């Protein structure tokens, strides 16, 4: 008679993991690309996380009083006003570790390049770029000094460092001495790109005084590393009868006056538009009307505007610097951003070669579709797992 077999014991359920999302930096509507990334990533993380993982958002007073995806999880308001840089640092470095310990947090993910430097929990930090080191003039005063101290320390004391691109990973290795094996490259995703019903082309042309000329669109902050001086110089190299209208939306900065003076010196003031604020409908109208999109930046941690253009089917010409070639792949016309003649040549090719525009439009849509927030979330969760396998608490 066969021996009676005892039933197999059910596998033990996975150990519950409590993850804190450090959003103390996020002042709704005022934090730029890092805010966009956080707002897109959070719902994807909640959708993709395993059942044994739970999240708590640690926010400042401004975000605590506003709507956002962090409301889909338990929220702890850190009592600081993050518009004040000193309070923001105080909240992240002194208050967050204590509040996280009180909440029983095992891992803190800081989403904006800085992170608490102490606390008995595992740490993951997303560092979007090292622009403060490559182009220190992009930040000034207390912000620049703070980044010089806080970003390197966050990278060195975290168990895992997430970089948006291989280019940023290489900067972390070269400039901060972070070991390659501690860095996870996690590209950003691309959500729905149309955010409003666009103005018609006729309305757009009238609103921005474009006449019947081709529209060349470039979206970026008006800061020196965005290389808009060279773009205006390249525009001036195009013969007047073949010259498009260049539209440069974006909030005013101290650098804009320099851009306007450059356009005046080169005699192209009538060919450049500087709208400081545009409504969502106006921006969508510009996208619909644009013959091409140009992005001449000298440095980008990721380059999301390139993907935004591609997803809309707008042909792209962009710089071959930093992360842009790896983001654009073969779906954009690349140029040397340091050479105005090369930029001008690329623009003319794109504007005058209909077959090239059609090919890049199609290739761009395909390329942009490869970048999803679902994949970003899955790769982020994999980084958490690596961090949880490390020794806890580097500080």
Image (cartoon, grey):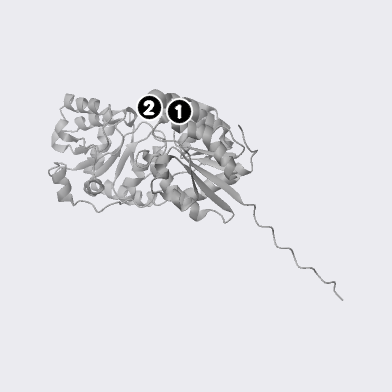
Which numbered tag is attached to residue 147? 1
Which numbered tag is attached to residue 239? none
Q: Secondary structure at mark 2?
A: loop
Q: Which residue is mark 2?
A: 139
Residue 213 in picture, x, y percent from top left:
15, 42
The structure residue drawn at horizontal position 21% and vertical position 25%, both measured from the top left corner, is 262
38 and 334: which is toward the camera:
38
The structure residue drawn at horizontal position 53% and vertical position 32%, both measured from the top left corner, is 94
In the rendered structure, the answer to whether residue 253 lies left or right of residue 74 reads left
* Total tally of numbered discs in the picture: 2
Report the residue that reaches farthest toward the right.
Answer: 1
Tell me whether the residue at label 2 lies in contact with that at label 1, contact meaning CB atoms closer than 8 angstroms.
yes
Report the residue that reaches farthest toward the front.
Answer: 79
In the rendered structure, the answer to whether residue 205 lies left or right of residue 74 reads left
197 and 219: which is toward the camera:
197
Residue 87 in picture, x, y percent from top left:
44, 31
Q: CA distance from mark 2 to mark 1?
A: 9 Å
């Amino acid at each position: 008679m066969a021996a009676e077999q005892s039933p197999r014991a059910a596998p033990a359920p996975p150990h519950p993991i409590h993850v804190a999302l450090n959003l103390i930096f996020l002042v709704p509507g005022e934090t730029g690309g890092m805010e966009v990334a956080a707002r897109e990533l959070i719902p994807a993380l909640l959708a993709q996380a395993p059942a044994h993982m739970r999240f708590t958002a640690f926010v400042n007073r401004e975000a605590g009083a506003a709507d956002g995806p962090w409301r889909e999880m338990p929220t702890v308001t850190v009592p600081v006003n993050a518009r004040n840089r000193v309070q923001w640092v105080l909240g992240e470095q002194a208050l967050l570790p204590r509040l996280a310990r009180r909440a029983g947090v095992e891992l803190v993910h800081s989403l904006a390049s800085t992170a608490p430097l102490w606390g008995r929990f595992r740490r993951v930090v997303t560092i979007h770029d090292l622009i403060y080191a490559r182009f220190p003039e992009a930040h000034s005063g207390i912000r620049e000094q703070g980044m010089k101290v806080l970003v390197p320390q966050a990278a060195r004391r975290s168990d895992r460092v997430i970089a948006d691109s291989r280019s940023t990973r290489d900067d972390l290795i070269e400039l901060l001495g972070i070991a390659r094996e501690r860095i996870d490259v996690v590209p950003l995703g691309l959500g729905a790109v149309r955010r409003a019903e666009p103005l018609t082309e006729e309305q757009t042309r009238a609103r921005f005084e474009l006449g019947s000329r081709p529209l060349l669109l470039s979206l970026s902050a008006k800061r020196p590393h965005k290389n808009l001086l060279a773009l205006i110089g390249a525009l001036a190299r195009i013969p007047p009868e073949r010259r498009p209208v260049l539209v440069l939306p974006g909030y005013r900065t101290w650098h804009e006056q320099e851009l306007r003076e450059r356009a005046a010196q080169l005699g192209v003031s009538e060919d450049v538009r500087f709208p400081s604020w545009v409504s969502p409908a106006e921006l969508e109208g510009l996208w619909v009307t644009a013959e091409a999109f140009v992005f001449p930046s000298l440095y980008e941690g990721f380059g999301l505007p390139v993907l935004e253009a591609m997803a809309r089917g707008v042909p792209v010409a962009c710089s071959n610097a930093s992360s842009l070639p790896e983001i654009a792949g073969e779906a954009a016309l690349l140029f040397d951003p340091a050479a105005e003649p090369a930029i001008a040549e690329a623009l003319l090719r794109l504007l005058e070669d209909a077959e090239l525009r059609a090919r890049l439009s199609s290739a761009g849509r395909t390329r942009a579709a490869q970048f999803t927030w679902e994949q970003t979330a899955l790769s982020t969760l994999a980084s958490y797992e690596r961090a949880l396998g490390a020794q806890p608490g580097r500080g």
